[in-house]
Amino acid sequence: MNYEAVIGLEVHVQVKTRSKMFSRVPVAFGAPENTLTDPVVLGLPGALPVMNLAALDAVIKAGLMLGCEIAPVCKWDRKNYFYPDSPKNYQISQYDQPLCRGGSVEIELPGPSRNVMGEHRRVPLTRIHLEEDVGKLNHGANESLVDFNRAGTPLMEIVSEPALRSAEEAFAFLTALRAVMVCGGISDCDMEKGQLRCDANISVRPEGSPRLGTKVELKNLNSISFVRDGIAHEIRRQLAVVQSGGVIVQETRDYDGQTGASQSLRTKEQEHDYRYFPDPDLMPVAVDAAWKERIRSQCPELPFERQRRFFSEYGLPYTITSVLVVDRELSEYFEEAARLSADPLAVGNWVVNQFLRELGEGKLSFAELRRRVPPAAAAELVAEIAKGTVLTTAVAGLSAALFQADPPVGVRQAIEKAGLAQRSSGEDLERWCREAIAGNPKALADFKAGRDSAINGFKGPVMRAAKGKADPKAVDEMLRRLLKEAG
């Protein structure tokens, strides 16, 4: 019997706000342990929560970008459980009246190669709700310590329908969702900082069956790659159980991305175990049309929409667009430069292949890219190369010259300072090429006999005469013209 996997994801995204969800304590990463707390965060008697409007705005924006229905009224509930990372022994969340329902995430499945666009489809969502994060347990050899700095941070939970069928689809879903969140300025989604976390619900069933199998929740998937690997591992484990006549037990399992193994943590809780009830300290939230329209006006172009526009408007290939649209700042930088240039494709090549390399090697931010090579300078650089001002062999050197100059210098100044300008005039180049042809009759005879590679015999003398300052492309073109004239 053939089986298929059924996967649903619960994605937790920390919302990018200055303060916590129900208190004025700042949100920060890396602060000394237990310094970002107050009576509200710690749940001390008499402390009352106050809602963070910026967090509500961010979740409404996420819902609008993903095509969700925004609830006209949502409310807050207490989710009760007893665990060391929850200082109040309950979590303020949303149960039966979440802020967003429905919607979908557009994903791209892997293409036949890395250079070709894959199939696109939409994965439906169940809901998006807002809650507060819990603390973090730090486990040592003989003790576990809790840090409440993270507790109370606004946390958005995005729940997909059980509509994914493979580990690769789950990887594509998280990649696309992360791009939307970053594009909207909703979250930085840095998994190393816990800003994006994912739990996967996985089951297997006979292929074509309408009934869902018993699901297993997989936790501690702390990178998108580990999500993919953990799901693939769990599918293999469940298939081995059912194909040997065993029964899948509903449970929560821990996946270790380093070893590629999982182990049972506990049997899975049911909803009634959390004893949800409305929070008596918080009023419901009414979202009117004016509020939604205010947020809708702030929603940027979605990454895949921008990619399709870059295809049609600028004629960029998939290899360039797939890099540009991952980051909103980078794609906006490209577009500013492209609108000032006669060759958007060349601008895209420079941004993706040269500028990103310099940023990575220098560990520089996008703000540094704008400071050292403003969009107008990128357009000027492409124009100078098109005019033949710069040697085509000097591309990497020019890129480095621009980034290493601090304070920044202009394009012409960088070319001159790095000695990358082509010094030969058209008359000099023609003279050197004629002298090279006259001085190598054997190569001339071979070229006339149809051996195209014989042209290389002339290039060395030309480059020596030019002291390395002649453009190889211009040399090749000049030699071919003269050789054609020579019959």
Image (spheres, rainbow, N blue to C red):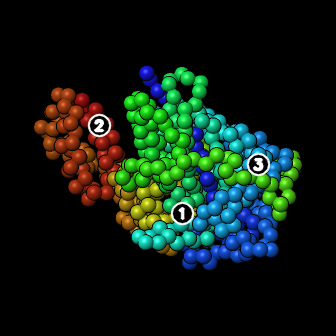
Say left or right for 92 vs 242: right
Please provide percent x and percent y for residue 443.
Answer: 15, 38
Local secondary structure at mark 3: loop
Q: Of the two numbered discs 3 and 1 on the same chain, state the one appearing first in sequence.
A: 3
Query: Which residue shows up at 69% across the image and 61% down it?
Result: 90
Q: Quadrant of the N terminus?
A: top left
How many numbered marks does the figure carry? 3
Q: Quadrant of residue 14?
A: bottom right
Give the vertical position of 402 relative to 210 (above or below): below
Look at the numbered discs 3 and 2 and tell me whether their residues touch, using CB distance below 8 Å: no
Q: Mark 3 or mark 2, which is nearer to you?
A: 3
Q: Which residue is mark 1?
A: 193
In the image as oriented, which residue stretches furthest toward the left?
442
Q: Quadrant of residue 66?
A: top right
Q: Amino acid at mark 2?
A: Arg
Give the vertical position of 299 relative to 152 (above or below): above
Query: Which of the pair 328/185 is nearer the observer?
Result: 185
Q: Of the two numbered discs 2 and 1 on the same chain, state the one appearing first in sequence.
A: 1
Query: Which residue shows up at 43% across the image and 33% down it?
Result: 246
Mark 3 surroundings within 10 Å by alpha-carbon count, few (fewer than 14), some (14 through 19), many (20 or more): many
Rounded to the nearest angstrom, the CA distance separating label 3 from label 1 is 25 Å
Query: Which of the pair 367/290 is nearer the observer?
Result: 290
Query: Which of the pair 108/151 is nearer the observer?
Result: 151
Give the label on residue 480, or none: 2
Local secondary structure at mark 2: helix
